[in-house]
Image (cartoon, rainbow, N blue to C red):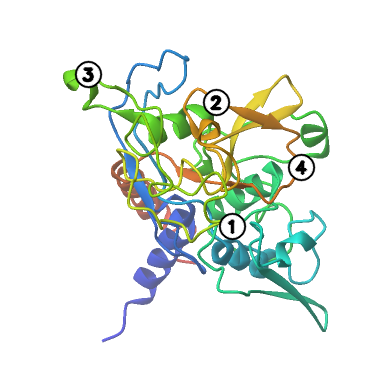
Amino acid sequence: MGMPENLRKTVKCVATLCLPLLGAGMAWGGISVPTVPVGNAGNAPDTSGYGEVDYNYRIGANDVTSSQYTAFLNAVATSSDPQGLYNGNMAGTTNGAPGIIQTPVSGGYTYSVTGGRGNNPVTYVSFWDAARFANWLQNGQPAGSEGAGTTETGAYTLTADGITNNTVTRNSATAWAVANENEWYKAAYYSPALNSGAGGYWLYATQSNSITTGQANYNGSVGDTTAVGSYAYPSYYGTSDQSGNVFQWNESIIDDSNRGFRGGSYLDPDSYAQSDDSYNDDPASVSNLVGFRVVMLPEPASLGLLGLAVMGLLQRRRNKKCAR
């Protein structure tokens, strides 16, 4: 027996409204973004002042990959790319380039990954590209032209003035975002097991105060990026490649004009990956050494409660809206 029409419409409404809110690594409209939980809310900061986070959240287990970013391009940049989400340097297959090919077709473009680099981190992305990717996740991975509801609103409201003046900040009640510096730092270096269970911070995101090229991709040991998760030395919370492979943008606004990034790269010495090293650049800049990582807020248990609340609201409103 088929689903009753009024129930089918209610389910459809619930799915439509809840899409941007649903959980860890779930694929809606194309890709899955695996995340890991970061608990121990209210932890103390490091001596540097970083790492304190007063809420539980989830963070990408890995950097955003070439394949994930390609799916994003194929969703929003096929007819045109007014925001420059694709950079021609992405087509390279060596020296940190992600191997993303833009192919002209009638009426626009398609995008694909070459050189077996689908699981390598995406690079040649600006902070604004990362923010637009987070907006796309927040909006439920829609297909459509770059603009409101796809890339310009959602986790961040991107306006010409906000971008020019570098004043864009994360919107409240968002489910997806680019990691801020404290979220990134805690996931990389914090462990509640250190200091006899009082908690503390490692120097590297490999649960160690020293590092070798067998633990992470740095100092030109490989000479290129590697597939995410290639090294079996994760942080306490289970993230990979927060030391080495590529730097990762974070939300921090530095000296009004720049955005922060951390983590070191495949070319740089290990000191660049240490917890006491941070960097920043023009948020519009791109590099073969810089990618990004997203977070999901709040943790899924809270999202489940929010989903139940939305379902209750929909039940009350179905005669007005869903059952038409």
Q: CA distance from mark 4 to mark 1?
A: 20 Å
Task: Name which of mark 4 and mark 1 comes first in the sequence.
Answer: 1
Q: CA distance from mark 3 to mark 1?
A: 36 Å
The image shows residue 20 at horizontal and vertical percentages of 49, 53
The residue lying furthest to the bottom in this view is 1
Q: Residue at x 83, y 79 (%)?
A: 107
How many numbered marks have been drawn onto this rendered protein structure? 4
Q: Which mark is residue 224?
A: 1
Residue 164 lies in quadrant: top right
Task: Name which of mark 3 and mark 4 comes first in the sequence.
Answer: 3
Question: Mark 4 or 2, which is nearer the eye?
Answer: 2
Q: Which residue is mark 4?
A: 285
In the rendered structure, which amino acid carries the disc numbered 2?
Answer: Asp
Q: Which residue is mark 2?
A: 277
Disc 4 crowd, CA 10 A, few/some/many (<14, 14-19, 20+): some
State whether residue 82 is above or below residue 250.
below
Q: CA distance from mark 1 to mark 2?
A: 22 Å
Question: Mark 1 or 2, which is nearer the eye?
Answer: 1
